Image: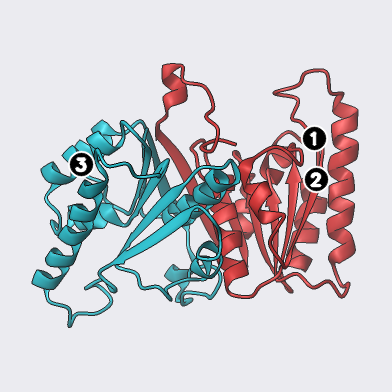
Chain colours: A red, B cyan
Amino acid sequence: MIIINTGNGKGKTTSAIGQIVRYLGQGFKICLIYLFKSEHCCGENNILSKLNNIDILYFVNQHPYFNTNIHTSDIILECNLALSKLKEFVNSNHRYDVFVLDEFNIALKDKFINEKNFISVVQLLSKQSDIIITGRGATQKLLDLADLVTDMIDVKHPYSHGILAKKGLEF
Amino acid sequence: MIIINTGNGKGKTTSAIGQIVRYLGQGFKICLIYLFKSEHCCGENNILSKLNNIDILYFVNQHPYFNTNIHTSDIILECNLALSKLKEFVNSNHRYDVFVLDEFNIALKDKFINEKNFISVVQLLSKQSDIIITGRGATQKLLDLADLVTDMIDVKHPYSHGILAKKGLEF
Protein backbone atom coordinates (compact mmCIF):
# COMPACT_ATOMS: atom_id res chain seq x y z
CA MET A 1 0.00 0.00 0.00
CA ILE A 2 1.25 3.50 -0.85
CA ILE A 3 0.25 6.20 1.64
CA ILE A 4 0.82 9.93 1.18
CA ASN A 5 0.64 12.67 3.83
CA THR A 6 0.71 16.02 2.10
CA GLY A 7 -0.71 19.56 2.41
CA ASN A 8 0.35 22.86 3.96
CA GLY A 9 -0.78 21.99 7.48
CA LYS A 10 0.78 20.33 10.50
CA GLY A 11 0.72 16.56 10.80
CA LYS A 12 2.47 15.08 7.77
CA THR A 13 5.64 13.87 9.49
CA THR A 14 3.97 13.80 12.91
CA SER A 15 1.30 11.44 11.64
CA ALA A 16 3.97 9.24 10.01
CA ILE A 17 5.75 9.05 13.39
CA GLY A 18 2.48 8.04 15.07
CA GLN A 19 1.97 5.48 12.32
CA ILE A 20 5.45 4.05 12.95
CA VAL A 21 4.65 3.64 16.66
CA ARG A 22 1.39 1.89 15.75
CA TYR A 23 3.14 -0.48 13.30
CA LEU A 24 5.91 -1.21 15.82
CA GLY A 25 3.30 -1.99 18.45
CA GLN A 26 1.84 -4.61 16.12
CA GLY A 27 5.23 -6.22 15.58
CA PHE A 28 6.08 -4.76 12.16
CA LYS A 29 9.58 -3.72 11.12
CA ILE A 30 10.30 -0.22 9.88
CA CYS A 31 12.85 1.61 7.77
CA LEU A 32 12.56 5.37 8.26
CA ILE A 33 14.46 7.50 5.75
CA TYR A 34 14.71 11.22 6.45
CA LEU A 35 15.57 13.87 3.91
CA PHE A 36 16.56 17.39 5.04
CA LYS A 37 16.82 16.50 8.72
CA SER A 38 19.72 15.62 10.97
CA GLU A 39 19.99 13.01 13.69
CA HIS A 40 19.35 15.66 16.33
CA CYS A 41 16.49 17.30 14.46
CA CYS A 42 13.66 16.40 16.67
CA GLY A 43 12.39 14.90 19.88
CA GLU A 44 10.86 11.82 18.30
CA ASN A 45 14.28 10.45 17.37
CA ASN A 46 15.34 10.34 21.01
CA ILE A 47 12.51 7.84 21.46
CA LEU A 48 12.44 6.02 18.11
CA SER A 49 16.20 5.36 18.09
CA LYS A 50 15.82 3.40 21.33
CA LEU A 51 13.04 1.14 20.07
CA ASN A 52 13.50 -2.26 18.47
CA ASN A 53 12.62 -3.10 14.87
CA ILE A 54 13.31 0.33 13.41
CA ASP A 55 16.28 1.54 11.39
CA ILE A 56 16.68 5.24 10.69
CA LEU A 57 18.68 6.69 7.80
CA TYR A 58 19.44 10.36 7.13
CA PHE A 59 20.24 12.00 3.80
CA VAL A 60 20.85 15.75 3.33
CA ASN A 61 21.13 17.27 6.78
CA GLN A 62 19.40 20.55 6.04
CA HIS A 63 17.01 21.98 3.51
CA PRO A 64 18.16 24.91 1.34
CA TYR A 65 15.12 26.80 2.59
CA PHE A 66 16.75 26.92 6.03
CA ASN A 67 20.38 26.97 4.92
CA THR A 68 21.01 28.85 1.68
CA ASN A 69 24.70 27.95 1.75
CA ILE A 70 23.99 24.38 0.63
CA HIS A 71 24.71 23.84 -3.08
CA THR A 72 21.85 22.40 -5.09
CA SER A 73 24.28 19.95 -6.71
CA ASP A 74 25.11 18.52 -3.27
CA ILE A 75 21.44 18.16 -2.42
CA ILE A 76 20.77 16.35 -5.69
CA LEU A 77 23.72 14.06 -5.04
CA GLU A 78 22.53 13.10 -1.55
CA CYS A 79 18.88 12.74 -2.56
CA ASN A 80 20.01 10.33 -5.24
CA LEU A 81 22.04 8.39 -2.71
CA ALA A 82 18.80 8.02 -0.77
CA LEU A 83 17.05 6.80 -3.92
CA SER A 84 19.89 4.34 -4.64
CA LYS A 85 19.61 3.02 -1.09
CA LEU A 86 15.90 2.53 -1.58
CA LYS A 87 16.52 0.79 -4.90
CA GLU A 88 18.88 -1.66 -3.14
CA PHE A 89 15.96 -2.88 -1.07
CA VAL A 90 13.93 -3.88 -4.16
CA ASN A 91 14.18 -7.64 -4.63
CA SER A 92 16.63 -7.88 -1.73
CA ASN A 93 15.90 -9.90 1.38
CA HIS A 94 15.25 -6.85 3.51
CA ARG A 95 13.26 -7.26 6.68
CA TYR A 96 11.07 -4.15 6.47
CA ASP A 97 7.28 -4.27 6.46
CA VAL A 98 7.08 -0.51 6.12
CA PHE A 99 9.23 2.21 4.57
CA VAL A 100 8.64 5.78 5.73
CA LEU A 101 10.07 8.31 3.29
CA ASP A 102 10.01 11.61 5.11
CA GLU A 103 9.91 14.81 3.00
CA PHE A 104 10.41 12.92 -0.27
CA ASN A 105 7.50 14.93 -1.71
CA ILE A 106 9.67 18.04 -1.33
CA ALA A 107 12.57 16.35 -3.13
CA LEU A 108 10.26 15.46 -6.02
CA LYS A 109 8.56 18.85 -6.13
CA ASP A 110 11.94 20.64 -6.15
CA LYS A 111 13.27 18.15 -8.73
CA PHE A 112 16.14 16.92 -6.54
CA ILE A 113 14.97 13.41 -7.41
CA ASN A 114 13.72 12.26 -10.81
CA GLU A 115 10.02 11.51 -10.44
CA LYS A 116 9.96 8.64 -12.95
CA ASN A 117 12.88 6.85 -11.25
CA PHE A 118 11.35 7.35 -7.82
CA ILE A 119 7.93 6.11 -8.86
CA SER A 120 9.37 2.99 -10.45
CA VAL A 121 11.25 2.13 -7.22
CA VAL A 122 8.20 2.85 -5.06
CA GLN A 123 5.98 0.70 -7.27
CA LEU A 124 8.34 -2.25 -6.93
CA LEU A 125 8.89 -1.79 -3.18
CA SER A 126 5.18 -1.47 -2.52
CA LYS A 127 4.69 -5.07 -3.68
CA GLN A 128 6.58 -6.17 -0.56
CA SER A 129 5.98 -3.36 1.97
CA ASP A 130 3.78 -0.43 2.89
CA ILE A 131 5.31 2.89 1.82
CA ILE A 132 4.51 6.16 3.59
CA ILE A 133 5.65 9.34 1.83
CA THR A 134 5.42 12.75 3.52
CA GLY A 135 5.94 16.37 2.55
CA ARG A 136 3.93 19.19 1.08
CA GLY A 137 3.28 19.44 -2.66
CA ALA A 138 2.98 15.75 -3.56
CA THR A 139 3.17 15.42 -7.35
CA GLN A 140 0.07 14.43 -9.29
CA LYS A 141 1.64 11.23 -10.63
CA LEU A 142 2.46 10.09 -7.11
CA LEU A 143 -1.06 10.98 -5.93
CA ASP A 144 -2.49 8.94 -8.81
CA LEU A 145 -0.38 5.97 -7.77
CA ALA A 146 -1.21 6.14 -4.04
CA ASP A 147 -3.83 4.06 -2.24
CA LEU A 148 -4.36 6.46 0.66
CA VAL A 149 -3.87 10.23 0.46
CA THR A 150 -4.45 12.71 3.27
CA ASP A 151 -4.21 16.44 2.73
CA MET A 152 -3.34 18.21 5.99
CA ILE A 153 -4.94 21.63 5.73
CA ASP A 154 -3.68 24.52 7.84
CA VAL A 155 -6.88 26.06 9.21
CA LYS A 156 -5.20 28.09 11.94
CA HIS A 157 -1.52 28.20 12.84
CA PRO A 158 0.26 30.25 15.52
CA TYR A 159 3.15 30.93 13.09
CA SER A 160 0.84 33.29 11.26
CA HIS A 161 0.63 35.29 14.51
CA GLY A 162 4.41 35.47 14.74
CA ILE A 163 4.89 32.63 17.24
CA LEU A 164 8.09 30.68 16.59
CA ALA A 165 8.53 26.90 16.34
CA LYS A 166 8.05 25.38 19.77
CA LYS A 167 10.10 22.55 21.29
CA GLY A 168 8.07 19.36 21.57
CA LEU A 169 5.41 20.65 19.22
CA GLU A 170 7.43 21.28 16.07
CA PHE A 171 10.75 19.53 16.72
CA MET B 1 -1.61 26.24 23.52
CA ILE B 2 -4.75 24.50 22.28
CA ILE B 3 -4.26 22.25 19.24
CA ILE B 4 -7.03 20.58 17.27
CA ASN B 5 -6.72 17.72 14.77
CA THR B 6 -10.02 17.35 12.97
CA GLY B 7 -11.45 16.43 9.55
CA ASN B 8 -12.68 13.31 7.78
CA GLY B 9 -9.23 12.04 6.81
CA LYS B 10 -6.62 9.84 8.39
CA GLY B 11 -4.08 11.33 10.78
CA LYS B 12 -5.99 12.93 13.66
CA THR B 13 -5.12 10.42 16.38
CA THR B 14 -2.04 9.18 14.49
CA SER B 15 -0.61 12.68 14.42
CA ALA B 16 -1.36 13.13 18.14
CA ILE B 17 0.56 9.89 18.83
CA GLY B 18 3.50 11.21 16.81
CA GLN B 19 3.25 14.46 18.73
CA ILE B 20 3.37 12.58 22.03
CA VAL B 21 6.54 10.78 20.95
CA ARG B 22 8.08 14.12 19.95
CA TYR B 23 7.14 15.73 23.29
CA LEU B 24 8.43 12.71 25.25
CA GLY B 25 11.70 12.89 23.33
CA GLN B 26 12.10 16.47 24.52
CA GLY B 27 11.51 15.49 28.14
CA PHE B 28 7.89 16.61 28.50
CA LYS B 29 5.28 14.74 30.54
CA ILE B 30 2.04 13.56 28.99
CA CYS B 31 -1.48 12.63 30.04
CA LEU B 32 -3.29 10.80 27.23
CA ILE B 33 -7.03 10.39 27.71
CA TYR B 34 -8.86 8.13 25.29
CA LEU B 35 -12.58 8.12 24.67
CA PHE B 36 -14.24 5.22 22.81
CA LYS B 37 -11.16 3.02 22.81
CA SER B 38 -10.01 0.17 25.00
CA GLU B 39 -6.58 -0.65 26.35
CA HIS B 40 -6.05 -3.19 23.58
CA CYS B 41 -7.39 -0.96 20.85
CA CYS B 42 -4.28 -0.31 18.96
CA GLY B 43 -0.64 -1.00 18.34
CA GLU B 44 0.63 2.33 19.63
CA ASN B 45 -0.40 1.48 23.17
CA ASN B 46 1.91 -1.53 23.23
CA ILE B 47 4.73 0.99 22.79
CA LEU B 48 3.44 4.06 24.66
CA SER B 49 2.51 2.11 27.78
CA LYS B 50 6.15 1.03 28.14
CA LEU B 51 7.59 4.56 27.91
CA ASN B 52 8.32 6.85 30.84
CA ASN B 53 6.56 10.14 31.52
CA ILE B 54 3.20 9.18 30.04
CA ASP B 55 -0.02 8.18 31.78
CA ILE B 56 -2.89 6.77 29.77
CA LEU B 57 -6.54 6.84 30.84
CA TYR B 58 -9.49 5.19 29.11
CA PHE B 59 -13.15 6.20 29.29
CA VAL B 60 -15.97 4.50 27.33
CA ASN B 61 -14.52 1.38 25.80
CA GLN B 62 -16.43 1.48 22.55
CA HIS B 63 -18.28 3.94 20.42
CA PRO B 64 -22.00 3.40 19.80
CA TYR B 65 -21.21 3.59 16.08
CA PHE B 66 -19.39 0.25 16.42
CA ASN B 67 -21.47 -1.22 19.24
CA THR B 68 -25.13 -0.28 19.13
CA ASN B 69 -25.82 -2.16 22.38
CA ILE B 70 -24.23 0.59 24.46
CA HIS B 71 -26.80 2.85 26.13
CA THR B 72 -26.36 6.55 25.44
CA SER B 73 -26.89 7.25 29.13
CA ASP B 74 -23.85 5.08 29.97
CA ILE B 75 -21.75 6.89 27.39
CA ILE B 76 -22.76 10.27 28.79
CA LEU B 77 -21.95 9.08 32.29
CA GLU B 78 -18.47 7.89 31.35
CA CYS B 79 -17.70 10.92 29.18
CA ASN B 80 -18.55 13.10 32.14
CA LEU B 81 -16.28 11.03 34.36
CA ALA B 82 -13.53 11.88 31.87
CA LEU B 83 -14.45 15.55 32.09
CA SER B 84 -14.46 15.41 35.91
CA LYS B 85 -11.03 13.80 35.85
CA LEU B 86 -9.78 16.59 33.59
CA LYS B 87 -11.32 19.18 35.89
CA GLU B 88 -9.42 17.68 38.84
CA PHE B 89 -6.18 18.60 37.12
CA VAL B 90 -7.08 22.30 36.99
CA ASN B 91 -5.25 24.13 39.78
CA SER B 92 -3.87 20.84 41.07
CA ASN B 93 -0.15 20.13 41.21
CA HIS B 94 -0.26 17.73 38.28
CA ARG B 95 2.96 17.03 36.46
CA TYR B 96 1.70 17.11 32.88
CA ASP B 97 3.09 19.45 30.23
CA VAL B 98 0.63 18.13 27.67
CA PHE B 99 -2.87 16.65 27.72
CA VAL B 100 -3.98 14.67 24.69
CA LEU B 101 -7.76 14.31 24.55
CA ASP B 102 -8.44 11.68 21.93
CA GLU B 103 -11.85 11.72 20.19
CA PHE B 104 -13.22 14.43 22.48
CA ASN B 105 -14.44 16.26 19.37
CA ILE B 106 -16.81 13.32 18.78
CA ALA B 107 -18.09 13.53 22.36
CA LEU B 108 -18.82 17.24 21.89
CA LYS B 109 -20.37 16.82 18.46
CA ASP B 110 -22.62 14.01 19.70
CA LYS B 111 -23.44 16.00 22.85
CA PHE B 112 -22.11 13.37 25.26
CA ILE B 113 -20.22 16.21 26.93
CA ASN B 114 -21.54 19.72 27.52
CA GLU B 115 -19.54 22.04 25.27
CA LYS B 116 -19.59 25.00 27.66
CA ASN B 117 -18.29 22.93 30.60
CA PHE B 118 -15.61 21.34 28.45
CA ILE B 119 -14.40 24.64 27.04
CA SER B 120 -14.17 26.20 30.48
CA VAL B 121 -11.98 23.30 31.72
CA VAL B 122 -9.80 23.40 28.59
CA GLN B 123 -9.31 27.15 28.88
CA LEU B 124 -8.12 26.82 32.47
CA LEU B 125 -5.90 23.78 31.77
CA SER B 126 -4.31 25.45 28.75
CA LYS B 127 -2.81 28.11 31.01
CA GLN B 128 -0.56 25.37 32.46
CA SER B 129 -0.25 22.81 29.65
CA ASP B 130 -0.59 22.24 25.92
CA ILE B 131 -3.88 20.56 25.03
CA ILE B 132 -4.31 18.42 21.91
CA ILE B 133 -7.88 17.49 21.00
CA THR B 134 -8.66 15.02 18.22
CA GLY B 135 -11.73 13.75 16.40
CA ARG B 136 -13.79 14.67 13.39
CA GLY B 137 -16.39 17.42 13.55
CA ALA B 138 -14.71 19.85 15.97
CA THR B 139 -17.30 22.40 17.11
CA GLN B 140 -17.01 26.01 15.95
CA LYS B 141 -16.58 27.34 19.49
CA LEU B 142 -13.65 25.03 20.10
CA LEU B 143 -12.13 25.96 16.74
CA ASP B 144 -12.46 29.64 17.66
CA LEU B 145 -10.65 28.99 20.93
CA ALA B 146 -7.79 26.93 19.44
CA ASP B 147 -4.34 28.23 18.56
CA LEU B 148 -3.53 25.57 15.98
CA VAL B 149 -6.11 23.75 13.87
CA THR B 150 -5.40 21.15 11.22
CA ASP B 151 -8.11 19.71 9.03
CA MET B 152 -7.15 16.23 7.80
CA ILE B 153 -8.85 15.87 4.43
CA ASP B 154 -9.51 12.43 2.98
CA VAL B 155 -8.34 12.76 -0.63
CA LYS B 156 -8.19 9.05 -1.34
CA HIS B 157 -8.89 6.18 1.04
CA PRO B 158 -8.85 2.43 0.39
CA TYR B 159 -12.00 2.02 2.53
CA SER B 160 -13.93 3.60 -0.29
CA HIS B 161 -12.77 0.67 -2.46
CA GLY B 162 -14.02 -1.80 0.11
CA ILE B 163 -10.68 -2.52 1.80
CA LEU B 164 -11.06 -3.18 5.52
CA ALA B 165 -9.10 -1.61 8.38
CA LYS B 166 -5.55 -2.95 8.32
CA LYS B 167 -3.45 -3.95 11.34
CA GLY B 168 -0.63 -1.51 11.94
CA LEU B 169 -2.15 1.09 9.66
CA GLU B 170 -5.49 1.70 11.36
CA PHE B 171 -5.13 0.04 14.75
| Left or right: where A51 falls relative to B98 | right
Secondary structure category for the residue under label 2: strand
For label 3, the residue is B121
Check chain identity for marks 2 and 3: say if they share one.
no
For label 2, the residue is A58
Question: Residue at 34% of width from left, 62% of height from top?
Answer: B57
Number of other residues with Cα within 10 Å of mark 2, as a class: few under 14, some 14 to 19, many 20 or more: some
Chain to which the residue tagged by mark 3 belongs: B
Q: Where is residue A108 in the image (x, y as percent from the top left)?
A: 73, 41
Tell me where residue A27 sits by quadrant.
bottom right
Number of other residues with Cα within 10 Å of mark 3, as a class: few under 14, some 14 to 19, many 20 or more: some
Tell me where residue A63 sits by quadrant.
top right
Q: Position of residue A153 (x, y in %)?
A: 44, 39
Q: Where is residue B41 in the image (x, y as percent from the top left)?
A: 42, 73
Looking at numbered disc 1 in the image, what kind of residue is underneath it? Asn
Looking at numbered disc 3 in the image, what kind of residue is underneath it? Val
For label 1, the residue is A61
Q: Nearer the viewer, residue A66 or B127?
A: B127
Question: Residue at 55% of width from left, 33% of height from top?
Answer: A167
**Count of marks overlaid on the render:** 3
